[in-house]
């Protein structure tokens, strides 16, 4: 047992580490609070537990499409997971037997909440009979699948979970919903290699945005180095639901003397959102006279675990905004003037598109195929700069110089956007192609 003096020295070292490197302190603490998570971080391997499945030959005649989603809960239903469940619903609307399958050993999804969320998200009041929710994360109750079932992976970890399952299936090929270049979520590491490996598996790419598809092809990622393979991909443009994202009514923009609002999509948990660089750019920008001519407030959004208040200098503070539901989030965008949303990725990020549809100005960054010209072609409300402190700051100043009211109000207002206005229209061709490929591979027509 250490002496009291040695214990005090150790305590002092831990206190010093907490002050100088909170992230490392938290990592060290994991070995006592969450040993499994500590090992995953230590070995730089994101956990992907085996799918708990039971192959049932009797189900051969009734194949299903299993859409793999790690977790279904209110805290995770951001743009990417919402697209997953949207795609599942519109596939089921064609009569395709679709199961949304959670893959993690977490508490069962609250189905009452989920069906209500899906109704709000899609505008479809009645759940399609062909759509169900199941779990493949419980070893005590494995999910029964048929030999002719097919799968749709939605994240690189779900594709890794599928890898040992596919050789047992009649169709050893899967659909892969690709919503970002996921190896880029990590530095060169084991996780980078595991994510990159999935692009070499036999799959049919389903791309959310042409910008992202172009990046895969330009990088020659996995099998996308083969033009013939890439040509088989399905590509859709995301919808910006005009029922939720539209300019504010006149009452909220009645006077130019109102306090104007800047939102910062500040996700500490997601490095590609460039929290540090965005914060530095914001501090630099608000010293410009453009932010002194009118009163401004600054809010941080983007996660249920909000940042603490952060000083921006000159007596101004970035305040955390409370977590909002889908309707509340749309209202927040309508009632704000600027969104700062960096995204070091070929994907635009959904908030960029949603804020532009609400008539506000958006400041984001370029990345590879995501050029300023291509973003301007989507909406003139999107200002894209290089991912530098100076570039983002200059774009913020330009956005602040725009008038407080720039668009006609109301849900019927025509804000120029080169994107579909609802998910049914956005996914129509893609779900039809998936249904045809499912039928071709399984020999079972939708609704049969």
Image: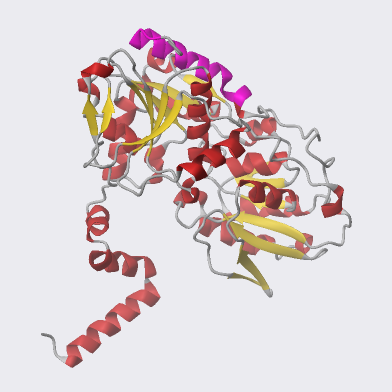
Residue 153, image x, y percentages: 37, 30
Residue 29, image x, y percentages: 28, 68
Q: Residue at x 58, y 40 (%)?
A: 350
In this view of the protein, can residue 152 be seen by the observer?
Answer: yes
Quadrant placement of the C terminus: top left
Q: Is residue 435 magenta?
A: yes
In the image shown, does 307 or 136 lie closer to the viewer?
136
- Is residue 274 depicted above or below 234 in this figure? below
In this view of the protein, can residue 385 be seen by the observer?
Answer: no
Residue 185 lies in quadrant: top left
Residue 42, image x, y percentages: 23, 56
Q: Is residue 257 left or right of residue 71?
A: right
Residue 345, image x, y percentages: 49, 40
Q: Is residue 127 magenta?
A: no
Q: Is residue 108 left or right of residue 404?
A: left
Q: Residue at x 46, y 13 (%)?
A: 447
In the image shown, does 215 or 362 lie closer to the viewer?
362
Quadrant placement of the N terminus: bottom left
Residue 103 lies in quadrant: top left
Q: Residue furthest left?
A: 1
- Is residue 361 depicted above or below 310 in this figure? above
Q: Main secondary structure of the magenta part?
A: helix
In the image shown, does 295 or 327 lie closer to the viewer?
327
Span shown in magenta: 424-444
Colouring scheme applied when the structure was drawn: secondary structure
Number of on-image labels: 0
Q: Residue furthest right?
A: 255
């Amino acid at each position: 047992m250490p002496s009291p003096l040695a214990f005090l020295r150790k305590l002092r070292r831990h206190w010093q580490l907490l002050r100088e490197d909170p992230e490392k302190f938290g990592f060290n603490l994991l070995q006592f609070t969450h040993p499994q998570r500590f090992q995953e971080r230590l070995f730089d391997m994101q956990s992907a537990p085996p799918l708990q499945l039971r192959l049932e030959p009797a189900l051969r005649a009734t194949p299903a499409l299993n859409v793999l989603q790690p977790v279904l809960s209110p805290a995770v239903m951001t743009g990417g997971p919402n697209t997953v469940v949207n795609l599942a619903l519109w596939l089921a609307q064609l009569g395709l037997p679709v199961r949304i399958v959670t893959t993690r050993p977490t508490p069962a999804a609250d189905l009452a909440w989920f069906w209500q969320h899906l109704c709000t998200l899609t505008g479809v009041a009645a759940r399609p009979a062909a759509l169900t929710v199941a779990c493949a994360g419980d070893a005590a109750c494995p999910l029964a699948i048929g030999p002719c079932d097919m799968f749709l992976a939605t994240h690189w970890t779900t594709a890794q979970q599928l890898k040992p399952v596919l050789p047992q299936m009649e169709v050893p090929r899967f659909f892969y919903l690709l919503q970002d270049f996921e190896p880029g979520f990590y530095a060169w590491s084991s996780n980078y290699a595991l994510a990159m490996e999935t692009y070499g598996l036999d799959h049919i790419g389903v791309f959310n945005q042409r910008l992202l598809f172009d990046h895969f092809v330009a990088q020659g990622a996995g099998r996308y180095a083969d033009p013939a393979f890439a040509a088989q991909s399905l590509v859709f443009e995301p919808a910006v639901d005009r029922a939720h994202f539209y300019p504010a009514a006149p009452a909220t923009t009645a006077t130019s003397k109102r306090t104007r609002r800047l939102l910062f999509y500040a996700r500490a948990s997601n490095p590609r959102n460039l929290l540090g660089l965005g914060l530095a750019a914001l501090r630099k920008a608000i010293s410009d006279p453009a932010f002194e001519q009118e009163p401004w407030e600054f809010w941080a959004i983007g996660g249920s675990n909000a940042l603490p208040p952060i000083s921006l200098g000159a007596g101004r503070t970035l305040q955390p905004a409370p977590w909002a539901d889908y309707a509340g989030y749309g209202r927040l965008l309508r009632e704000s003037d600027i969104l700062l949303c960096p995204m070091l990725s070929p994907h635009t990020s959904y908030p960029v598109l949603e804020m532009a549809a609400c008539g506000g100005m958006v400041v984001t960054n370029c990345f590879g195929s995501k050029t300023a010209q291509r973003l301007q072609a989507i909406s003139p409300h999107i200002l894209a700069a290089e991912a530098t402190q100076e570039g983002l700051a200059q774009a913020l100043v330009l956005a602040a110089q725009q008038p407080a009211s720039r668009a006609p109000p109301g849900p019927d207002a025509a804000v120029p956007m080169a994107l579909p206005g609802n998910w049914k229209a956005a996914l129509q061709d893609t779900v039809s192609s998936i249904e045809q490929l499912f039928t071709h591979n399984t020999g079972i027509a939708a609704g049969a």
